[in-house]
Amino acid sequence: MQNISVIEPIAPAIERVKVMLFKPFDLGKWFTIGFCAWLAYLFQGGGGGGGGNFSNPQQGGCPNFPAIFNEHLVLIIVLGAVIACIVIAITVVCLWLSSRGKFMFLHCVATNKAEVKIPWHQYRQHGNSLFVFRLVAGIISIVAIAVLAGIITGLGFLMHHNGIGKWEMALLLVPVSLITLLPVLIAIMVFFKFTSDFVIPIMFLRANKAVEGWREFLGILSANKGIFALYILFQIIIAMAIGAIVFAAALTACCFCCCTACIWFIPYISTVILLPVLVFKLAYSLYFLRQFGPQLDVFTPMAIQSIS
């Protein structure tokens, strides 16, 4: 195996951004590829934070919340169940769209084509397999975190029942939480990061299912644990650099015009604006992966021909 570098993919990834988006500049191409990118990051996108307006009651003192809760218990339960079902349904739909979108965006970057309809239908089975895999993995992750959080909470109640003070509880529970929850959270984030960066391209090339893609990637990972650990650390550095650039650009736009700054908060438009960053991130992981062999290169004419 040749030497694998986390630095070498930077230059071709930047060149890929130039070729796709600036040679020549085509606004229609930006909006088409941006739509695929928006779908790909739909489930991972974050919304703007909102603040609450808390004011002191002017008359009548504080409401009796326990009495209100007991009086309308059935209504609260029904409304809570309805809202929970709506949130779950929206989440599942977004996850499904995102799974299809990831292959659409990868298709655009790999082939340098601005297409929506063709990859939407061509990678239907890929996206559905990825959707089921991500859904099951997400449920398992949530259950694992909930179990650990429940154990820590139960330990806290037990300590409180035995008369242990707050400071003593904090001194014990905080380290326990860090030792148990933090490694699990990191493992979950790395798992989904590897799925997005490497398993999806393998599925893209092999036309196989997510489990089979992970099985092939595990063979590569087990033989190159050190370089993939370095990859994760370098990804953190890249994310910090990109975050600083995006923050500086948003701050500049805000200083230039408040209306211009508001565009950053429109999901699809903001994705189009940040398209060079998203193309670079995906291209970087693809160029890193191809260092492990030509059979993992999505940019080769043979690979592009086989998936077209």
Image (cartoon, rainbow, N blue to C red):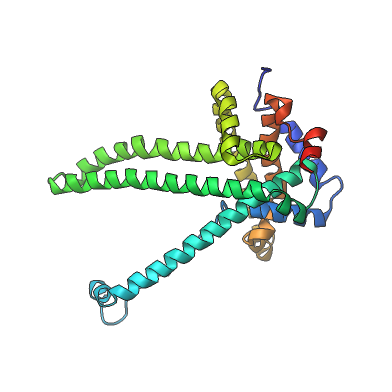
Along the viewing direction, whichever of 4 and 269 lies nearer the viewer: 4
* Residue 51 position (above or below residue 36): below
* Residue 48 screen position, x and y as percent: 54, 59
Q: Is residue 248 visible?
A: no
* In the image: residue 228, left or right of residue 163: right
Q: Residue furthest right?
A: 24
Query: Residue 21 or 149: which is nearer the viewer?
Result: 149
Give the percent coordinates (x, y) of residue 306: 78, 38
Task: Determine the residue positioned at 17% across, 48% down.
Answer: 160
Q: Where is residue 128 in the image (x, y as percent from the top left)?
A: 61, 50
Q: Where is residue 229 in the image (x, y as percent from the top left)?
A: 54, 27
Q: How many marks?
A: 0
134 or 58, which is in the foreground? Answer: 134
23 and 125: which is toward the camera:
125
Residue drawn where x is 54% and y is 49% of the image: 132
Which quarter of the picture shows residue 240? top right
- Asked where in the image residue 47 lies, by quadrant, the reply is bottom right
Please say if 75 is above or below 134: below
Q: Which residue is pictured at 86% across the width and 45% down the height? A: 23
Decide if residue 97 is on the left or right side of residue 28: left
Residue 77 visible somewhere in the drawing: yes
| Quadrant occupied by the C terminus | top right
Q: Looking at this view, name the residue that lies furthest to the left.
A: 163
Q: Quadrant of the N terminus?
A: top right
